[in-house]
Image (tube, helix red, strand yellow):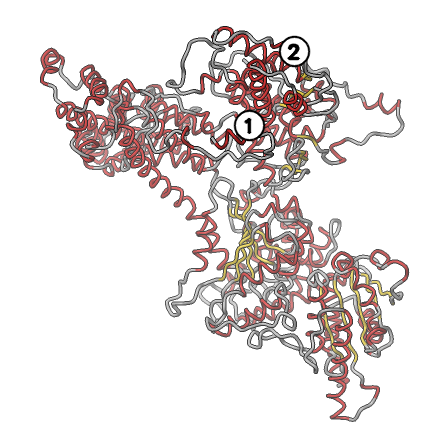
Amino acid sequence: MALDETNSLSRLTEQFPGYEKFTSHITSVTLSFVLPFLYITDRHNPRITASLLNQIYRNSGDCSPTHFAHINATACFTARLLYDTVLNALAGWEVTWENGCQNWPGEDGKRYNDSIDSFLHGLRNLRNKSWGGTAKGSGRTADEEPRMVLLIERAERLKDNLPDLIVPLTRLAELSQVKITTILLSSARWEDIKPPLGASPDPYFIDIDPPSKQDTVDSLLFEFRSASITHARADKQDKTYHPSLLPLYEQYVEHVYNVCSLYTTDIQELQYIAAARWPGFVKPVLREQSDAHGDGDPDPDGTCTELTLPASDGRMRLLKFFTPSLTTALDVLYPRLTNATDWALANDPDMQASEEAQCQTNTEGSIIVDHLPRMSKFILLAAFLASTNPAKSDVRMFGRGADKQKRRRRKSASPKKAGAQTTVAKVSQRLLGPVVFPLDRLLAILGALLEENDVENRPHEPWFELPGEYTDMELGRVHIYAAITELTSMRALHRTTAVEKLEGPPMYKCGISFWVAGALAKDLQVPLNDLMWDPV
Amino acid sequence: MAVDAGLEDVNQTTVYIPFNDSDDVNTDAAPPSLFPERDFHQGCQLRFQACRAAWGKCLKRMHELIHSLHAPVVESVVEQVKKSYTDELPGLPYPELPVVSVTSSSTSSSLFDEISFRLEENTDELFEDINDHFVTHVFPSDCVTITGTMKTIVSGFVSRSPTGGQDIKRKPSTSLAAYDIALLEAWYRVVCDARDERYHRSRLVVIMHDFEQLEPQVVQDMFEICSSYIPRLPLVFILALASPPSPSYIRATYPHSMLALLRVRDCPFPLAEKSLHDILLETFFDPTFEPDIMIGPTAIDFAVDFFARHSSSLDGLLSILQLAHMKHFEEPLSVLAPTHALERSNDAAKLLLTPDAFPFLDALFARVQESTLIAPVEHATSWRSATVDSLLSSVETARDTFRMRAKLLRVAFRLLLLVRQLMLVHGHKTVQGDQTVPDLMCLALRGRLGSVHGHLCSVVRKLTAAQLEDFVRVVHDFFGDVPEDVKTEENEVISRVETAYKMLCRDASAQEISGPLGNWLSEYFKLRIVALEDAPLWDIWYTGSTPFPSELINPSPRASIIAGLIHPRDYMSPRQRSGDDEDDDLPDISILFKGYLESAKMINVYDWFESFVVFLEARKRRVGKTRIPDGANGISRTPSRKKGKQKQVEVEVVDEDAGEDEEWLMEVQARFIRALQELDYLGFIKHTGRKADHVMRTVFDSPE
């Protein structure tokens, strides 16, 4: 038994490098029931910590009677869901369709999910049942009272979903008289979700340190080994995750870390990027191997043969060659502009089209706004201006004076002068976010934009003679309103008044960013900067 | 009578006026013809049938085209669902939730029905009653809260019995909640056991309609919950987006933490503009398809412009073309559009020899006489012997002529496009020009493509040997594919192309072939691409340059209402119009509106009323029926403290001055109030309550 334990512990340290101290700490704290309430703060990788805890308690099930429930506070969005999930998990009860998806029935067949009291009752029942079960075998002793652990991941969500349950959950052992440890795992601090008036006891705090470089590399190497094991099991021909590539992978991962660590040190993000680039990276190496062995003799079981790795200068050249593509991978994959699978395909070093694919991935710099009718583009632009410019500036910005050439008496934007007068620098509205505007203002600005920029593009209608009459007519068209509604349903405009409200003009807010507006303006050939009160 | 008595009775507080539709127009009757001077009695019905048939044919074709446009998108979505969970990149930190986003702004929602049909159908021969995947639909109205969302998703799948047998009852209190995803997991385990899924697993597909309208916080939670259950539950999400793919809504709205859980793949539609061009081309310029009515350049222009400017939806295009058809069949002569139109319904001669069909016959006869259908020599004599049958048979001749002409034009136009495209492939950028395909269509229909094909043919003459070989082969193949009747008609150019083809085989020099070939093609285009208006009786089958009724597609309600108030007579049918004097039959609301336009920002209701009275009295005086009532006196007696129109009524009722004047005044007042309320209802008046007796104007447009 002791051997088992050390074995599993050593495996854990291998899988989760950097967590050795934490593992021993948490096992010693919880395996003997000392503390009823723990709070673990992990700002970096709560997901990894959760899976580590999960493994600790699942594996220790053989050696000590620990009942373990691991729930996610996001998933348990109602109290009933939480009670059901926790009790079923603690009891190890598997819900089956055949018996009507019944919950853990307990002894008395009562329902345990209608209030916190019945939940506590259920907990006690569970304790008694498993205690009684073991007692029959080995005699009833107080020591063997079963210990339970309840791990709540994303605990910060409890505050929104189940604010009333935070206090009972933190005092669970006290209330139920069961040896149950509650562990809240969160990326937020306890101070942020603590219920007021000291209703909860103070937890035992554990903070997780950020992983060091070596830890990161080690855990990626572990993932590589497990991937190669699953690959070997699946009996696949390709040798991308061949075990003998491990030294090369180590160097590669270190390189990835060096390139990307400036932007992210998140293990999973690094692993994501590494996984996307690795098949392309290792391809030349594998090709060289198969060339050397001759094409006619593909090894039937790839796992047995050793692959010869390139010499150190070869490796250096490989790394150097792939460095730029690592940065582009970071650019595209970190904000998830595309996914790793597609990126790996598009950036295959053999593919000639890779250059093209590079151009097509839409990064922030190149926004193409197509798929929108011309009028909708004008409406969006007008909405952007209405949301950015102050309303009182409209006459000056869009009003046409008698002299057409000098129609715009724009504020001669002189920040120096303004700075001299007032010490408080005024933040541009563009940075403060959009302001609300009524529909009428949107239409008025749209009219001004159309009159200035769209007259030449319209089909000629001979019966409009007065200047601006045609624009006025166009503004009242049904499809202008239809387009506004459609843009609202696309969330490119936000309607801030309720749809049911009839009185008063509907109010809107612009939903596009400055960059999109810039792309639209470029497309429509509208001088956006001239029309903005605070030009960029 | 009872109503009158009730109205007279002072003690009655409520009077029921029964609905009496006698003064309604009989809706069953055919609408009056726009051209009564050359229409006949049954013409409208017949034209309506013809319109239905013609539009039905066109619509069927366009539906097929749109459907084929959907097909690749549907195919790729289905493919991605099928491949999900199997084509994952090894070495990823955790499995990602597959999400397919489909941008569907330009197309109808039937796309998702097609997708879900394809996913749920059965492709396995072994188990016939088993569907491939499970699909459930989620609409924004279900997703106000996370509980509702999860309930919709879970019950969408679970409501189907996994084994096909009796559904197992679940106790609501002691079983899993209906919104618990663990329930779905239990259900799915049974499904897998029942199906013995070793080779392929059914995916659980969730189609989220109108994804933008969903609450982002709810969606975020939902994705997080679902992603913690994969790959035990092979969920696949299909998002129906209305927003364009390029500033991506998903990436702009949701945080990185959620996006990291998903593997989003886009399935964009081809550009809407391109599909519009294709549909127009394949419907009206396809050698093998013959629409009953050929759409003229104005309608095409309008459709393209409207599509680019207002709404890039293919449904909108359908409406535009339908309207063009309906507009076309307003013309009485268009009753002759379908083949044997009149014979089919009943005896044509009998139908047309009734007295009320004579204007129609006259018009038709005049058109046939002035057309080229009858040789000028016979002109002097033939009109004497003209019968209905002979008239109709000349219409038949005209129809065949027009059909063939249109067909040859189509073939020539397609060849022109083909040549243009070939030249582009060969790197002659200049042939591109600045015309789009619809521009070319319009030019071709007007017969003004001369400069374009002139340029093309001059490029043909300069082709190098290798390019020429390719070119001649393609042109030869093109003529090999045209329908038989076109082949017989075009034997001249076909034989010339044949000659060129043979010369090519004999290794003649490029110069020898390309020079004459260019000339031949130029001749051919000149002969065939001519305006359709030159054909006799063309307006029966061709909408030509009739202006498109754009007001019906994209009306301007505000302008129409104001115009209606100012010129109500323009909106009356001609029969109802009587009298020449402008003011005589002006409705009350228009009289009021005149005053409205002349007033300032705030209107004094009392002054308004007075001017109304003055106007009516002036009219009355002109008609000279009754003596002039002393309106000023009658009004001056009303107390001046009244605040609004209701007060006025009360006060008036109380007024005891009997006699005709009084009655007249009451009538005027009632009419005023009614008109005022109509204006109020239309939204022209705002009650501010800031100033007694005043209302505010809401419309400040200067009419005209």
Decide: is B308 above or below A168: above
Neighbour tally class for label 2: few under 14, some 14-19, many 20 plus, Cα within 10 Å: few
B656 to the left or right of A180:
left
The local secondary structure at tag 1 comes to helix
Q: Give x and y (percent) for residue B243.
A: 57, 41
Q: Nearer the viewer, mark 1 or mark 2?
A: 1
Residue A326 visible, this angle: no
Is B11 on the left-hand or right-hand side of A464? right
Number of labelled discs?
2
B466 w.r.t. A204: above or below: above
**Residue topped by disc 1:** B8
Q: Residue at x 26, y 28 (%)?
A: B43
* Residue B572 placement (x, y as % from top left): 43, 20
At horizontal 65% and vertical 73% (from top left) the residue drawn is B174
**Mark 1 surroundings: few (<14), some (14-19) or many (≥20) residues within 10 A:** few
Residue A176, position in %: x, y? Answer: 81, 75
Q: Quadrant of the N terminus of chain A?
A: bottom right
Task: Name which residue type carries label 2.
Answer: Gln
Q: Amino acid at mark 1?
A: Glu
**Residue B257 horizontal side relative to residue B297, left or right:** right
Residue A366 tag number: none
Please determine whether, in this image, residue A406 is positioned above or below residue A331: above
Gap in angstroms between the C-alphas marked 1 and 2:
69 Å
Can you tell which quarter of the image residue A244 is in? bottom right
Q: Quadrant of residue B177?
A: bottom right
For disc 2, the marked residue is A405
Q: Please state which of residues B26 and A121 is positioned toward the viewer in this rendering.
A: B26
